[in-house]
Amino acid sequence: MNIFEYFFLNSQDLCFISNFDGCFEIVNPYFEQKLGYSQKELLEKKFLNFIHPDDTAASLKEMEKLKEGEVSLGFTNRYRKKDGDYLWVEWNASPNQADKKIYAIGRDITKKKIDEENGQKYIQELRNSEQHIKAIFDNAPDPVIVIDEKNNVVKWNPKAETVFGWKTNEVLGKSLIQFIIPSQFKESYDKEMEPFLTKGFENLSNTSFEIEAKNKKGIEFPISLSISSYKIDEKKYYFICFVRDIAQNKKILDELKISENFLDSIIENFPAIIFVKNVSDLRYVRVNKVVEEVFGFSKKEILGKNDYEIFPKEEADRFVANDKKLLDTGKLLEINDEPAHTKYKGIRIFETKIVLVKDSIGKPIYILGISNDITDRKRIQTELDNKTKELARSNIELEQFAYVASHDLQEPLRMVTSYLQLLEKRYKDKLDQDAKEFISFAVDGSNRMRTLIQSLLEYSRINRANAFENFDVNLLLKQVQKNLSATIAENKAIIKVDDLPEIYGDPILINQLFQNLIQNGIKFKNDKDPEIYISCKEEGNNYLFSVKDNGIGIQKEYIDQIFVIFKRLHGRDKYPGTGMGLAICKKIVERHGGKIWAESEFGKGSTFYFTLSKK
């Protein structure tokens, strides 16, 4: 081994000897160490087998130069290590034409290459970052202005041009205060900016304030100005001004304040009790003035307190249980007939509804309650119920009295009539014409009295609780016409009936209602044959029936009197009757929850209207 080979083998650089075909003949231990291959794995293998594919073409080109006798200095390529990683090597190679061998010494420059790549990457990232910043600056949705320590404009983004109206070339190098701050607000601007601009860079902090600005047209509007600083070098720094037009925000805030005031006014002046509790500790956070009026406690005595600090324990337990039930279910809770102590009025009865108030994400934050003092209403209702019961008892007693009285009265009337008739029969030859006439008057009076008593009995029986049922009015009217067939035929009356609905009611009473109205239409006729037209139409939850005739009609001044009991508009000699018919009709309709009235044109007929509920 000559001295060259000794140096070659013991060098701390990568060394190898190959033939002109590129096959390794000798590699030094450092080469083995760096690449991780053994002599056996390297010798007689072509070095191209270990080179990165991207470097193969350049390595072949260098190999051709060496074969032609040129020395290669500073050529770099990457060798694949056994672990799969790559090693950057800078080679100096020299050919020996005599023995057709290449002698190469290489230096590991991997770290240098990595540092260079990282440097290039950093430079590229910096360039990308600058591009990103420029893109953000140019496309910011709000004006962004950069000023120097003298308040002069350095940069002015497109949005600033749009909002303020000045182009970038019009403002660069000019003081910001010269064109966007109205003169009356310059002092305020200087006051806000002066400490910020005069501090040393090391002591600078961000600042933000609201001020009026103006655009190129002189229109003033409020802005929010946020300023932060960044350092250029040891002696120079800039300030970035982020501008936001807050005119719309201020308008929204003003409208919100108006809405809040409006809501406060509604709550405070609402005629019912309104209270609000926190869900966290069930303490009162809001009550209106009705609470003070009803309970006698001032707002100061209620706000911040819980139920146990205001009401007796038994009542507080009940209120808290209701609140917890609401929190568990989340559904509106209605509490009826709830007693509660007041400061001066004793125990009152309340009707209360409580509901959860949630935030924007659905989390419960408050319990809202609306309550009414129904003590007086309950008392009135109780009194009304008692009166109704008394009236019902009275009606029963009156009906019983009417029945007994009518029965007891009819018996002596029959006796009076019988004896008068007997007197006339036995002594008719001895009685003069006046006596016979007097007897006739007495008999007629007794008969009319009997008819009147029967009508009163019929009137008193209308409110008896007969069971209601569904029935077809068409079939009922056929029965009515059959009952009145003799009267209809005698008076040559014409009855016309539309298709009528099925209704729910007392068929006996409704039969009597139609029969009375048809009889009236026939009885109060003029010189024409009677014509009666019956129809019906739907009106909301009711049926509206009408019974129209072509009779004598009713004068307007008497139209409101015809349904009064015993009220007659004509003498008995012309139109006989008791004056009870229409009063009975009115009571029947009212028994069914409806109303009855008449419309008429004197001499041309009348129409009677009445409503009956569908249910």
Image: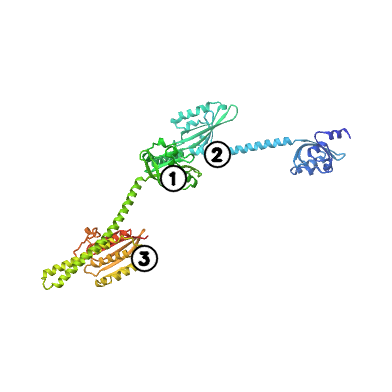
Q: Which residue does the numbered mark 1 point to in the structure image?
A: 354
Asked if disc 1 and disc 2 are in contact, CB closer than 8 Å, the reply is: no
User: Which is more toward the observer, 37 or 22?
Assistant: 37
Image spot of residue 568 (x, y percent): 21, 61
- The residue furthest right is 1
Secondary structure state at the residue bearing disc 3 = strand
State whether residue 310 is above or below residue 475: above
Secondary element at image label 2: helix
C-alpha distance separating marks 1 and 3? 46 Å
- On screen, residue 575 above or below 192: below
Given residues 267 and 235, the one toward you in this image is: 267
Residue 138 is labelled as 2
- Give the Cα distance between marks 2 and 3: 84 Å
Of the two numbered discs 1 and 2 in the rendering, the one whose residue sits closer to the viewer: 1
Labels 2 and 3: the sequence-earlier one: 2
From the image, tell me which residue sits under label 3: 471
Find the distance from the CA under tag 1 to the CA under tag 2.
Answer: 54 Å
Q: Tell me if residue 230 comes above or below residue 313 in the rendering.
A: above
Residue 326 drawn at (x, y percent): 47, 45
Colouring scheme, one of rainbow, by chain, secondary structure, one colour = rainbow
Q: Is residue 458 left or right of residue 47?
A: left
Q: Position of residue 300 (x, y in %)?
A: 41, 35
In the image, which disc is placed on residue 202? none
